[in-house]
């Protein structure tokens, strides 16, 4: 049986987001959450994606959501979201959750790991 | 995703709130108890004060308050005291605030910081920590704190925080006891510890109305001499004064309101028992958070306080050197028992700052520090001595307590006038 990785993403439990003056701010709160001296903010689409990341979500699901709500091609959205997720993982703001899926497509196991 | 420089980020948040009223910054005093007995302190109580301890908000109340602050849009929280670590459960209060996403500054004297506390802070990194130094030597430090061994405990606390690369700044309150070591403290902070240093010589009467801290307050001449010993500080005052005096008229105050600061507009304070007020030193008007909610206190009570009308004109209204002056209604409350009364001490310091820069202060009413006033000659003479470098801060000797006011500290009776209502709610 061959396993294929399908990454899903989730907000790190070591950051907290706040809505301040209509802007989403992400504040790392403890060690292991990237740069504790930084405060992160997003543009409107970034804020929407951050809201989706409250639950596990895949790049494909986020792409679908963005193309449903914004006037952007699927190809462009996919590219931008992949880049954005790379930044979020690099900054320690989200964790990756890899589903080990059998070649039959049957769900086998899920484990979470920290982003960096 | 944007990663902003902090100053730009802070500016952006304040800009977004410009013209709006929101409690962006809240100061929370977790306790007034403190292991030190500093002669100049405006609110400290003994560690053994059972009544003070039993009246403090519990951990659960702090968590509830934090939830309400978050819902009200607060971003910056300052935890201060007394001494914050005098409460054994302060780490729990602090972590609860961190978990809610506040940017937290801690004011502490550093003497109760242990390796375990420093480790906790390294894991849950604060936005900033400020430790107040009381002297550069053990002798001076402990002359002001009155607690043997406190200097070494403070130094240990500093080393523990720096060893974990925490965002530490040092500061002091210059008094007659430690005035000769202010610039040595600055050197120590910047060169030995590699951290920023600042000082503020403003010493207030106690919030229980005792005037005992004034016994160690510097004279106006000493305050200004200390300021101008630092060329950068002198330059900053010069810049501020030039800006003020370039205006045709005095800066317009917030209409006809008593308060003209950010208190009640973008900031407020909560004392150890849950009383909300405009700021930590203003106690004439307080709202019992325990009997209501933060939002109600902010929306209704503090708005009413903030928009309280002035009852009279004072010499401060048309004063053109307000940026050289520390006068605010809370200082008036503490020193004069009346938020609207100018404080002569502050008035003299401001005028001396201007005169020592060779500036004239435009006429602004019946002012004792202006030409023809009762304090003008003395203020001018001091300014000339400072301007002519006749006062050598570097040669100051260890100072002493200036006046026999100290016994008031022990009396626990306050002023007895009940003007501000503080005497009944605080003991000292």
Image (cartoon, grey):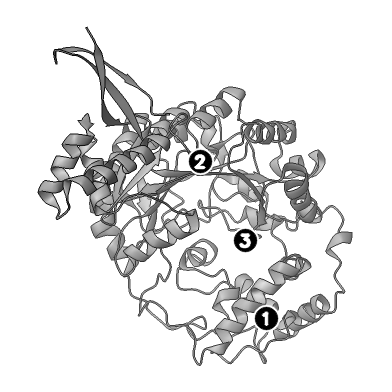
- Whole-angstrom CA distance, mark 3 to mark 2, is 19 Å
Name the residue that disc number 2 marks: B32
Which chain is disc 3 placed on?
B
**Label 1 Cα crowd, 10 Å radius (few <14 / some 14-19 / many 20+):** many
Q: Position of residue A7 (x, y in %)?
A: 27, 26
Q: Position of residue B371 (x, y in %)?
A: 67, 91
Name the residue that disc number 3 marks: B202
Name the residue that disc number 1 marks: B354
Q: Is residue B345 visible?
A: yes
Q: Who's the residue at 34% across and 68% down the image?
A: B18
- Quadrant housing residue B356: bottom right
Which chain is disc 1 placed on?
B
- Whole-angstrom CA distance, mark 1 to mark 3, is 17 Å
Q: In the image, which is nearer the foreground, mark 3 or mark 2?
A: 3
Give the residue at the far left of this rendering: A68
* Disc nearer the start of the sequence (3/2): 2
- Whole-angstrom CA distance, mark 2 to mark 1, is 36 Å
Q: Is residue B68 visible?
A: no
Q: Position of residue B247 (x, y in %)?
A: 52, 89
**Residue in the foreground of this view, choosing between B355 and B166:** B166
């Amino acid at each position: 049986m061959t396993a294929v990785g399908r990454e899903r993403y989730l907000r790190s439990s070591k950051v907290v987001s706040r809505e301040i003056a209509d802007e989403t701010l992400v504040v790392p709160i403890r060690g292991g959450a990237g740069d504790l001296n930084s405060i992160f903010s997003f543009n409107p689409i970034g804020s929407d994606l951050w809201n989706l990341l409250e639950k596990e979500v895949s790049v494909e699901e986020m792409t679908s959501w963005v193309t449903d709500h914004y006037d952007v091609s699927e190809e462009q959205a996919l590219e931008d979201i992949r880049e954005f997720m790379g930044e979020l993982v690099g900054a320690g703001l989200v964790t990756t959750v890899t589903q080990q899926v059998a070649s039959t497509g049957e769900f086998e196991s899920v484990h979470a790991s920290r982003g960096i | 995703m944007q990663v902003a420089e902090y100053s730009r980020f802070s500016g952006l948040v304040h800009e977004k709130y410009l013209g709006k009223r929101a409690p962006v910054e809240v100061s929370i005093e977790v306790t007034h108890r403190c292991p030190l007995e500093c002669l100049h302190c405006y609110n400290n109580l003994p560690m053994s004060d059972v009544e003070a301890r039993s009246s403090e908000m519990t951990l659960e109340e702090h968590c509830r308050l934090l939830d309400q602050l978050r819902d009200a849009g607060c971003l910056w929280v300052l935890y201060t005291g007394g001494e914050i670590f005098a409460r054994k459960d302060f780490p729990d209060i602090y972590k609860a605030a961190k978990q809610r996403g506040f940017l937290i500054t801690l004011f502490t004297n550093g003497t109760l910081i242990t390796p375990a506390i420093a480790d906790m802070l390294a894991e849950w990194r604060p936005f900033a920590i400020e430790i107040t130094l009381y002297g550069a030597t053990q002798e001076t430090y402990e002359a002001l704190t009155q607690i043997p061994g406190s200097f070494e405990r403070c130094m240990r606390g500093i080393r523990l925080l720096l060893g974990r690369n925490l965002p530490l700044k040092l500061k002091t309150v210059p008094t007659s006891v430690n005035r000769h070591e202010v610039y040595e403290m600055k050197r120590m902070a910047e060169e030995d510890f590699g951290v920023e240093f600042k000082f503020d010589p403003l010493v207030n009467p106690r919030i229980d109305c005792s005037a005992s801290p004034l016994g160690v307050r510097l004279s106006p001449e000493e305050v200004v001499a200390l300021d101008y010993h630092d060329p950068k500080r002198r330059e900053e005052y010069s810049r501020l004064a030039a800006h003020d005096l370039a205006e045709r008229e005095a800066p317009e105050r917030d209409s006809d309101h008593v308060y003209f600061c950010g208190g009640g507009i973008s900031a407020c304070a909560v004392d150890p028992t849950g009383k909300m007020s405009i700021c930590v030193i203003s106690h004439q008007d307080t709202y019992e958070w325990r009997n209501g909610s933060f939002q109600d206190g902010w929306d209704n009570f503090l708005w009413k306080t903030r928009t309280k009308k002035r009852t009279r004109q004072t010499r401060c209204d048309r004063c053109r050197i307000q940026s050289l002056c520390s006068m605010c209604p809370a200082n008036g409350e503490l020193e004069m028992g009346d938020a609207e009364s100018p404080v002569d001490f502050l008035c003299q310091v401001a005028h001396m700052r201007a005169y020592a820069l060779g500036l004239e202060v435009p006429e602004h009413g019946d002012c004792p520090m202006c030409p023809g006033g009762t304090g003008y000659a003395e203020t001018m003479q001091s300014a000339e001595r400072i301007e002519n470098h006749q006062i050598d801060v570097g040669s100051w000797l260890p100072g002493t307590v200036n006046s026999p006011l100290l016994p008031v500290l022990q009396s626990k009776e306050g002023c007895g006038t009940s003007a501000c209502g503080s005497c009944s709610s605080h003991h000292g």
